Image: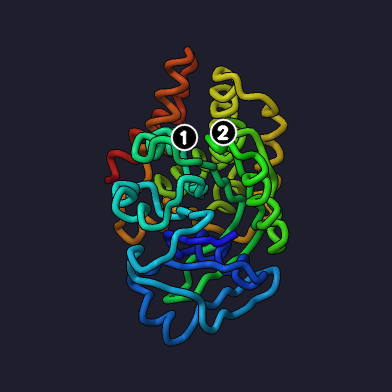
Amino acid sequence: MRYAVIGTGAIGGYYGARLDKAGFEVHFLLHSDYRFVVDNGLTVDSCDGSFHLPSPKVYDNTASMPECDVVIVALKTTNNHLLPSLLPPLLKPDTIVLLIQNGIGVEADVENMFPGQPLAAGLAFICSAKAGPGHVNHQFYGNINIGNYSCTDLQRFQQLVDDFRAAGIGAASVGYLEARWKKAVWNMPFNGMTVALNTTTNRLLSCDATRRLIYDQMLEVIGAANALGVNNIDPSFADKMIANTVKMPPYSPSMKLDYDFRRPMEIEYLYSRPIAEAKAAGFAMPKLEMLEAELKFLI
């Protein structure tokens, strides 16, 4: 299948480059890095083996890009208002739009923009950061869960998952709500807490008090997911996420980097929407509501 990447940064740049390296046709949209990547290519420094793409197919506007079978959207959700102008040149009726984005409620809003377009959710468990122009630094992990939101062609959806696996990416097909809420178990505590306390993941877990708070916040997310009917998620998943994070190098999640560089933070989909959905199902998330309020104060 032919791929497009919208948002060639820490996440889109990594997964798109892996697909390109494996021989898939990938077209990258770039903005500030465009001229640099045209001249110098795209570099991925990776714990799984570094590599360089000397001449990737890059563009500075989607009007010049071909229609694709899969469009990987790896923009921050704060830029989703750009999608109505960015996506149409790339879409066929059967193009799968894979939203590798944080939060709850993303697909529902994109579906309103593009009724009938096949959508899937990509939930990346990865430590990756943009190190400079055309330069991705992949530090740890890298698996991705892919949830089918509205793809009726199941064979085509499975081909997407298989392509990721063929590129050496640990990809799994997971129920949509399960995928979204499992990612929220990590995202909601660590993104906001690193901002509110101006710290990194390892320091949060090295202090008994904040480690307990992180765990309690994870249990709130799991409780909300269960109240919404999500299966295959219980407190043991919080234990797993804590253990996995302990193994990671010191890490600043995307929201912490956005705050440090004075970019908009993804509060709406990471906090406001899941808290509201949980409340509508009769489940309160008081510790995460407090964190949401602290983040809104810092805007």
x, y percent for residue 245: 64, 49
Q: Which mark is residue 181?
A: 2
x, y percent for residue 119: 50, 41
Q: Is residue 140 above or below residue 269?
A: below
Residue 209 shows up from this direction = no
Separation of residues labelled 2 and 1 (CA atoms):
8 Å
Instruction: Tell me whether the residue at label 2 lies in contact with that at label 1, contact meaning CB atoms closer than 8 angstroms.
Output: yes
Residue located 72% across and 61% down the image:
166
* Residue bearing the label numbered 1: 104
Q: Which amino acid, mark 1?
A: Ile
Crowding at label 1, few (<14), some or many (≥20) Cα neighbours within 10 Å?
Answer: many
Residue located 43% across and 59% down the image:
6
Q: Residue furthest top?
A: 282
Q: Which mark is residue 124?
A: none
Q: Residue furthest front?
A: 93
Q: Is residue 172 above or below residue 274?
A: below
